[in-house]
Image (cartoon, helix red, strand yellow):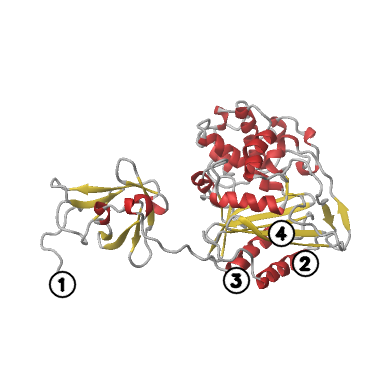
Amino acid sequence: MTSFFEDLLPTTERALLHRIAVAQTEGRAPSFVAGVMREGRTVWSGSRSCVDGHAPDADTQFRIGSITKVFTAVLVMRLRDEGLIGLDDPLEKHLQGTGVGEVTIAQLLSHSAGLAAETPSPWWERTPGSTRPELADVLGEQPVLHPAGRLFHYSNPGYTLLGSLVEALRGVPWEEALRTEILEPLGLGRTTVLPVAPHAGGWAVHPWADVMLPEPLEDLGIMAPAGVLWSTVEDLCRFAAFLAEGDDRVLCRTSVAEMRTPAVPPAAGDAVWGYGLGVQLMRSGDRTFVGHTGSLPGFVAGLWVSVDDGLAAVALSNATSGPLAAAVAADLVRIVAEAEPRIPEPWRPLPAAEVDEELLALTGPWYWGTYAFGLRVGAGRSVTLEPLKGVGRRASFRALPDGGWIGLDGYYQGETLRVVRRPDGSVSHLDLGSFVFTREPYEQGDAVPGGVDEAGWRGL
């Protein structure tokens, strides 16, 4: 992407600062720090504090809670890409004795395994991990509450299981796999399991008085993969760039895009509108956000990426409740996107080597019955089939090595598009998952199932 403006405009920066200032004041937060990533780099960060001269910066650590789950999900997807697991494998195939039955790895990633939301008492976020030394202590006597795969039910123990899966297959502790496979390759040197100065302290702010209480800092033990991490605005902006584009050193672009694909709808009343493989999905206006929220006693966090805008934002605060970090992160993206819309790349023709006369001959209008579609050719012999008017089933297709194309999105995702030729080699029609597309609406011949009335079209 060509960047004509490396830095944000002063008016945009002021709008961003105003948004976090309002958040810190109205949320009664001891401190609040945020940042914006555009096209892979941090272009703005700002903060507010209740103590003059002690405002955090983009290198100050805050605890990020359940944003940790995205890191755990990336480790699991790496195992899949290496062929060590399948997403549809039952967890018990690789991690025996958990007592969760036939729940799959994909269901655990998407919170659709039906597991309990929390561990048995006491509240795990405010008690030492030594209280639950084994998986049985995390899962309790009734770990499964709902039929697997039927609904979205957020589960912290589910991500503890995924962390244990990583440990079992890697033969190293979860935090070591995290460090060597994600943090070091992406340069996230300020993302850690334990706090490293400079870092914020966690506070509870009284709901009815302007007074504060320090929150305890606990080692979460085997619950760590569900929410242990500390990080900074700068590190999380860098991680957001990875979630938008992928990085072959960690996880390729297509696998990251797979994580961002909706796997289950949200629970009734949930603020997000879906969940992918380890990431939350949210719609705000006509904008789609991908990322995660996070909280632990003393801290709230939000990270949202708008892939189409090339933007992401991070918001962190050190209060148990009050500041709406996730809402602020979404607002920061919106402010930049509306004030400084993404400048598209210039149009360029296809490389000469990709110009194929037979493929060009397939472009233009095609008809499924009387519905008019247009077929357009893209880079790498890809094609797009889209309705010429109204609402319809638009889809993009990737070329297959042995001919034909595979659907990438929409109704035709995973379906095969192929060219059907007559004995003389001329094109008869396109076949898309048994649907016939002809050059004319209900074209005469043997292509249209059920045949076409020989008398042809007629008036009243």
**Residue with the mark numbered 3:** 339
Q: Amino acid at mark 3?
A: Ala
Nearer mark to the viewer, of 3 and 1? 3
Sequence-wise first label, 4 or 3: 4
**Residue with the mark numbered 2:** 26
Question: Which residue is rendered at x = 33% and y = 41% of the image?
Answer: 401
Nearer mark to the viewer, of 4 and 1? 4
- The C terminus lies in quadrant: bottom left
**Residue with the mark numbered 1:** 459
Secondary structure beneath dot 4 equals: strand
Marks 1 and 2, how far apart at CA: 69 Å
Mark 1 near mark 2, Cβ–Cβ under 8 Å? no
Q: Amino acid at mark 2?
A: Glu
Secondary structure beneath dot 1 equals: loop
Secondary structure beneath dot 3 equals: helix
Sequence-wise first label, 2 or 4: 2
Marks 2 and 4, how far apart at CA: 16 Å
50 to the left or right of 237? right
On screen, residue 160 above or below 66: above
Marks 4 and 3, how far apart at CA: 18 Å
Residue 34 is tagged as 4
Task: Give coordinates of residue 245: x percent, y percent.
Answer: 54, 50
